[in-house]
Amino acid sequence: TFGTNATADIDVSAANISIQNFIFIASVASCATCFEMVSATDFSVEYCEFRDAAATTGFINLIDTDAVANGNDGLYFCNNRWKSLDDIAATSALDIDETIDRMQVNDNFIVCNQAVNSTPVLVDAATFDLTNVEIARNKVYRLGDAATGGILLETSSTASTGFVYDNKCTCSDPT
C-alpha cells in the first residue's frame, strides 16, 4: 500500500525482474507511479491488480520508464487489472519516456476515471519509437470524455513497428 508519500515508488534498476500476483493500493492522492524503471531490460509485471483506495487517491501511472533509448527493452505488462477512481490524477498505465523494443502489453483489464487528462489510458509513448511491439486483447474503459485524449495508445513516431490487435476500447463520453 502506497499511503503516506505521493512520490514513493518501487525502483526497478536490474534486468530480468518479474513481479507476479501482487495487489498494489494507492491510498495517497496523486501517487506518481508504482514502478519507476531505471535502465531495466526485460521487466515483467503479470497477474497484478492496481487499486485506488478512494475516489481522491490513486496512481498517476503504473509504470514509468527511463529516458534512455532502449534502456527498458522487453517490457512485459500482461494479465493485469487496474481500476482507477481518481479522475484528477490518473494518466496512463504505461508512461514510455524513450524508444523501446520488444514491449508486450496483452490481456489487461483497465477501467480508468480519466476525466481531465489528455493522455491515452493504456500506453503513452509520446514521440518515441515502439519497435517490435505487441499490444493485444486488452479491455480498456475510459470513464471520461475521449475527446480529451485517446484510449489505447499514443505515439507520433513513424518508425514504430509491431502489432496492435483485438483490443476493446470504450468511453463514457457524455456528449
Image: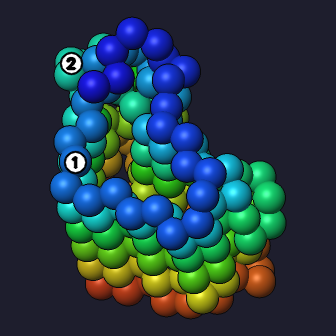
Please tell me whether mark 2 or mark 1 is closer to you in this view: 1
Question: Dot 2 surroundings within 10 Å: few (below 14), some, or many (20 or more)?
Answer: some
> From the viewer's perspective, is residue 126 above or below residue 91?
below
> From the viewer's perspective, is residue 138 above or below residue 12?
below
Q: What residue is shown with label 2?
A: 54
Looking at the rendering, in which quadrant would you find the C terminus? top left
Q: Which of 43 and 98 is in front in this view?
A: 43
Mark 2 or mark 1, earlier in chain:
1
Q: Residue at x 33, y 75 (%)?
A: 106
Q: Nearer the viewer, residue 28 or 173?
A: 28
Instruction: From the top left corner, tell me how far across and down residue 138 is, in percent.
Output: 29, 70
Residue 56 in view of the camera:
yes
Instruction: From the top left corner, tell me how far across and down residue 45 is, in percent.
Output: 36, 61
Q: What residue is shown with label 1?
A: 22
Q: Is mark 1 on a helix, strand or loop?
A: loop
* Colour mode of the rendering: rainbow
Q: Which of 65 and 163 is in front in this view?
A: 65
Q: Residue at x 48, y 38 (%)?
A: 10
Instruction: From the top left corner, tell me how far across and down residue 55 is, in percent.
Output: 24, 19
Looking at the rendering, in which quadrant would you find the N terminus? top left
Res. 121 mark: none
- Indicate left or right for 119 with 22 as reference: right
Residue 81 in view of the camera:
no
Q: Which residue is drawn at 33% across and 15% down?
A: 3
- Indicate left or right for 72 with 25 as reference: right
Q: What residue type is labelled 1?
A: Phe
Q: What element carries label 2?
A: loop
Q: Distance between the residues labelled 2 and 1?
A: 19 Å
> From the viewer's perspective, is residue 145 above or below residue 162?
above
Q: What residue type is labelled 2?
A: Ala
